[in-house]
Amino acid sequence: MLYVLDLLGTLVFAISGALQANRHELDYLGFMVLAVATGVGGGIVRDVLLGVTPPAVFQDEVYLVVCIVGGAVVYWAAPPIAKRWNRVMIADTIGLGVFAAMGAAKGAEYGLGPIGVVMIAAITATGGGVIRDLLVREVPAVIKGGFYATAALLGGGAYLLAQYAGLSEPVQLTAAILTTTGLRAWAVYKKVSMPLAQPVDDLTS
């Protein structure tokens, strides 16, 4: 079940990358690059940081195929997908939770400390989106006030709390998924975001 959810999250992230390519009017290769970068970028960065080579996505190429399919679908049918973006965002929220949970689990497996586990959870969940935005020369969405990376960080914390409580690994993963997904869904529904800094010009006026 977790594998299926992981593939679903990869697909949705790939679609979001391809929609970004559509917004910037890129060519077909651009669609594929952003779809793959967004879908599996976080996992690749995680594995490189942990010294896992080759990264998991190259050991199971189904993830890459899912990204390519997502990019191709958006290339040929971007308008109807964009109209249903609210539904896509539901899957995106679930995918964020799954990626955060799997990142936390892998960080713990490789002996990281509490801060490392939480950071790897967030990197796995948001790394692809950061790469996507940098490729199109935009400030990464995860640091522009949204409650996205924060939800992933707290999800990693929930994983650790469940681990320290001596609960089983399935319960640890579930705690991370529910925390991340629940917080992200709440933030989207309530339009909650992290406070933005006041511009320097306003402070000195």
Image: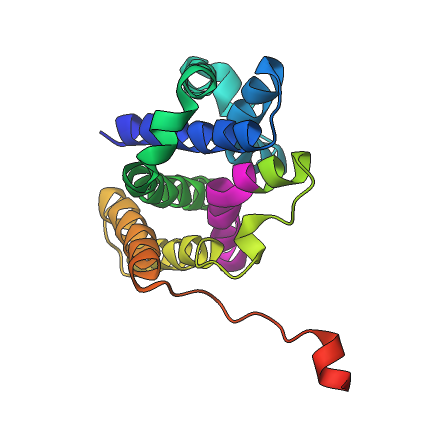
Along the line of sight, the residue nearer the viewer: 81 or 38: 81
Q: Is residue 40 above or below residue 174?
A: above
- Residue 186 within the magenta-colored segment of the rendering: no
- Residue 123 within the magenta-colored segment of the rendering: yes
Along the line of sight, the residue nearer the viewer: 69 or 94: 69
Looking at the rendering, which quadrant does residue 187 occupy? Answer: bottom left
Looking at the rendering, which quadrant does residue 151 occupy? Answer: bottom left
| Residue at image coords 27%, 26% | 4
Quadrant in which the C terminus appears? bottom right
**Residue range (magenta):** 111-129
Quadrant in which the N terminus appears? top left
Along the line of sight, the residue nearer the viewer: 23 or 44: 23
Give percent across and percent down for residue 81. Answer: 35, 28
Along the line of sight, the residue nearer the viewer: 175 or 86: 86
Give percent across and percent down for residue 45. Answer: 59, 35
Give percent across and percent down for residue 82. Answer: 38, 33
| Residue at image coords 56%, 58% | 144
Residue 53 visible: no
Give percent across and percent down for residue 14. Answer: 46, 27
